[in-house]
Amino acid sequence: MLIIGPPGSGKGTQAERISERLGVVAISTGDIFRAHVKGGTPLGVEATRYMDAGDFVPDSVTNEMVRNRLSQDDAGNGFVLDGYPRTVAQVDYLDAILAAGEQELGVVLQLTADDAELVSRLLGRARETGRSDDNESVIRHRLDLYHQQTEAVVARYAGRGILAQVDGIGGIDDVTDRVLACIGNVLGAPVDGR
Ligand code: AMP
């Protein structure tokens, strides 16, 4: 499955929880990029200037990285992919990867939240973690990109009838419960509760 949401919607947290519940690996493109930046790899050096500006890392870098990651053994039984695709071109690329591996998307989960709430959450996170892309002008740019590009991704999956939309505002456990119920509805079978 995929998890899509604006920056600050809690998609990373929910992706980890869902992956535990479904027994499949959680893969976050943002985390992979941050690991490369930390390790000072050539990919990290390339990605960092885009990330710090709140821009998307170019598809030429991102697509290949995702293809490699999804080809690893632990993704063979399924995965929760967080942060990809973010553009319609990436949707096409992911379709090709999945078709080649004879895999199919089960659910695309969108976490929703309004911009004012997101900005205040992200400014709070910036104070706690010092993430270099969590200052106000970069935050607003990342939100703009989400509206301009990633909402079209959501529309694509809605057209395929596999979209589950969940309100991301509220306590972490409450959101997880809503998410699991919603995934169960799309899959047509309940996802085990705690
Ligand atoms: P995230 O942790 O998902 O908010 O991602 C952090 C940053 O990594 C983004 O602001 C982008 O610069 C980059 N990034 C993550 N996923 C993608 C993607 N699918 N396409 C392009 N850039 C990405």
Image (cartoon, rainbow, N blue to C red):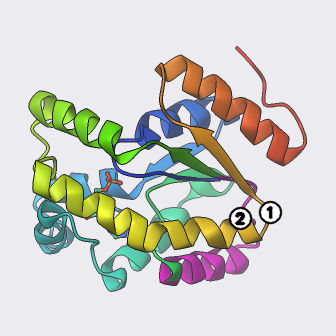
Which quarter of the figure has residue 122? top left
| Quarter holding ligand 1 | bottom left
Tally of numbered tags: 2
Which corner quadrant holds the C terminus? top right
Q: Which mark is residue 85?
A: none
Name the residue that disc number 2 marks: 158
The residue at 40%/52% (across/down) is 6
Q: Nearer the viewer, residue 11 or 44?
A: 11
Measured as percent of width and height from the top left, residue 139 is found at 20, 53
Vertical side of 160 occupied by 64: above or below: below
Give the residues drawn in magenta, as a range. 89-108
Point out residue 181 in the picture as x, y percentages from the top left corner: 75, 31
Is residue 26 left or right of 59 when viewed as pictured? right
What residue is at 43 percent from the left and 33 percent from the top? 13
Vertical side of 50 occupied by 138: above or below: above
Overall secondary structure of the magenta stretch?
helix
